[in-house]
Amino acid sequence: MRNQNVVVALTTRDNDYQAEQSASAAEVASRLGVKINVVYADNNAVNQTQQLVKIIQDKAQRPDAILVEPVGTPMYQVAKAAVAAGIGWGILNREADYIPELRRAAAQVPVFALSPDQEEVGRIQGKQLAAFTTEGNILYIEGPSTSSAANLRTKGMLSTKPSKVEVKVLKADWSERGAHQAVKSWLALTTSSQLHIRAVVCQNDAMAMGAREAFASLPEPARGQWLNIPFMGCDGVTKTGQEWVRSGQLRATVVIPPMAGLALEMLAKALSTGSMPAERTLCAPRSFPAIAEIRA
């Protein structure tokens, strides 16, 4: 039987978690003998749609399946076109309510969703926050409003944060540069100096480091005051997020296992056996350090 051919469509090269996604897919592909083509959307939803539509329409080199982490919406029309062309579809790190519909229409083409428990990611961050402060204002840097991951993480955080903690929300695009710019713009407002911020909580580690860099560019004594408060992120990649916690640049992160490698394993099994993967699989995140250790 010929090697399976899978496109792995990720959001950007400029993110440590996306790099981990690519590495996990490459490791599994090498182990299972699957040919993969990793493409990046440069954090542009239109670009990602155009990439995948071109791949689907190329009858000479159509892949067996596409694994995609969407930049924007869950890409219903693209998913529908892929399945209609006999291409399997796996969506990563995103809720997609169209999965049951496409599974009914797909026959033996695998269609599934695989994601960390995004709400639990937020709940863990709320518990981490409670270990640092039980009242006052925090700065919360959130991913795009079109992202279900961002919305679920916020929901989870709000459910477990201390009741006397007030949240000031800034928006960014999951990138270090985006968070740096968001914080820099916020600092230019006169109202920013009126809030006594107790912690900076970010929806990924890259944004947490971008926020730190924005505060690090301030003159003393403001610089030292800002950099002494806890900065928290999530993704928890071993060589970046976890290392930043060990070095003291971040006080905590949430470890989210890369989905692409696991999704490729599920997909390869489905393509080999003709079975359908579970419609939706959630993977458990964990606090780093453990909550008890942070409290201690």
Image: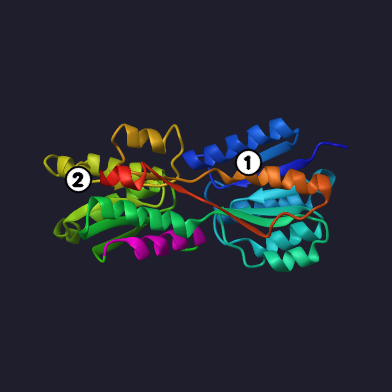
Q: Which mark is residue 261?
A: 1
* 192 on left or right of 22: left
User: Residue at position x 64%, y 32% from top?
Assistant: 27
Identified by mark 1, the residue type is Gly
Residue wearing tag 2: 226
Secondary structure, mark 1, is helix
Magenta range? 147-162
Query: Which residue is farthest right?
Result: 1
Judge by depth and name the residue closer to the eye, 139 or 173. 139
* 221 on left or right of 203: left
Q: Residues within 10 Å of mark 1 (few under 14, many from 20)?
A: many
Task: Please provide percent x and percent y for residue 224.
Answer: 16, 40
Q: Is residue 233 magenta?
A: no
The answer to which image quadrant residue 205 occupies is top left
Task: Please provide percent x and percent y for residue 279.
Answer: 68, 60
Identified by mark 2, the residue type is Trp
Judge by depth and name the residue closer to the eye, 35 or 32. 32
Q: Is residue 87 above or below residue 255?
A: below
The answer to which image quadrant residue 269 occupies is top right
Secondary structure, mark 2, is helix
